[in-house]
């Protein structure tokens, strides 16, 4: 659902130095975490992966316009994520925002029950989804460890954005 690809291509540096060094890509995208419901994990994700913590609010003026929606994997969280996606689909989000992905944070250890797993698949059919597993240390407030295993793709996305 990224709508900014043309802007990134147009912002590649042009001019005589391009013949010497080759094209220079723009600095990485900055991004904002936006919770689709209370307790989604936005502050924790911002502390571990970087980026702007917007809580449950849309990014304001001057904040990064690239949005990562965050939800827990319980029924209410997945419903909230689908509602937020619907706002983007209908264009009812603030102008200038780009939805990069949805980040689903485990609400409990273990596998998802089948009905919830089906809802996740539905969301995955419409937008890029990154999953974050249950991390017991985060529950205790320890956010200093490396990102959990299984989130390498999210690490690549957020590190690329931070450059």
Image (cartoon, grey):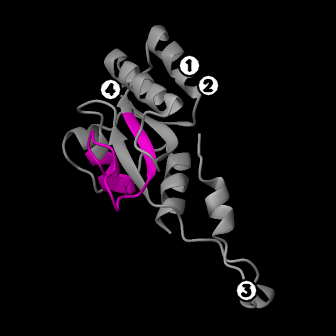
**Which residue was labeled with disc 3?**
15
Q: Which mark is residue 122?
A: 1
Category of crowding for the residue at label 1, using alpha-carbon neighbours closer than 10 angstroms: few (below 14), some (14–19), many (at least 20): few
| View extreme (right): residue | 19
Closer to viewer: mark 4 or mark 1: 1
Write the residue at 44% across / 29% down.
87
Write the residue at 50% across / 21% down.
120
Observer-nearest residue: 70 or 159? Answer: 70
Is residue 20 highlighted in magenta? no
Sequence-first tag of 3 and 4? 3
- Above or below, comparing residue 23 to residue 135 in the picture: below
Judged from the image, the secondary structure of the residue bearing numbered disc 1 is: helix
- Above or below, comparing residue 106 to residue 43 in the picture: above
On the image, the x and y values in percent for residue 138 come to 26, 43
Q: Which mark is residue 125?
A: 2
**Which residue was labeled with disc 4?**
107
Observer-nearest residue: 43 or 55? Answer: 55
């Amino acid at each position: 659902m990224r709508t900014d690809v043309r802007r990134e291509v147009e912002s590649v540096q042009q001019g005589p130095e391009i013949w010497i060094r080759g094209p220079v890509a723009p600095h990485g995208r900055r991004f904002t975490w936006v919770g689709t419901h209370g307790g989604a994990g936005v502050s924790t994700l911002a502390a571990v992966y970087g980026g702007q913590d917007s809580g449950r609010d849309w990014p304001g003026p001057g904040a990064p316009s690239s949005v990562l929606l965050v939800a827990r994997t319980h029924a209410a969280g997945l419903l909230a994520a689908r509602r937020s996606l619907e706002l983007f689909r209908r264009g009812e989000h603030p102008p200038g925002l780009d939805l990069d992905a949805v980040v689903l944070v485990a609400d409990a250890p273990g596998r998802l029950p089948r009905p919830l797993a089906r809802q996740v698949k539905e969301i995955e059919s419409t937008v890029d989804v990154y999953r974050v597993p249950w991390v017991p240390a985060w529950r205790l407030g320890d956010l200093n460890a490396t990102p959990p295993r299984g989130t390498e793709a999210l690490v690549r996305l957020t590190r690329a954005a931070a450059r």
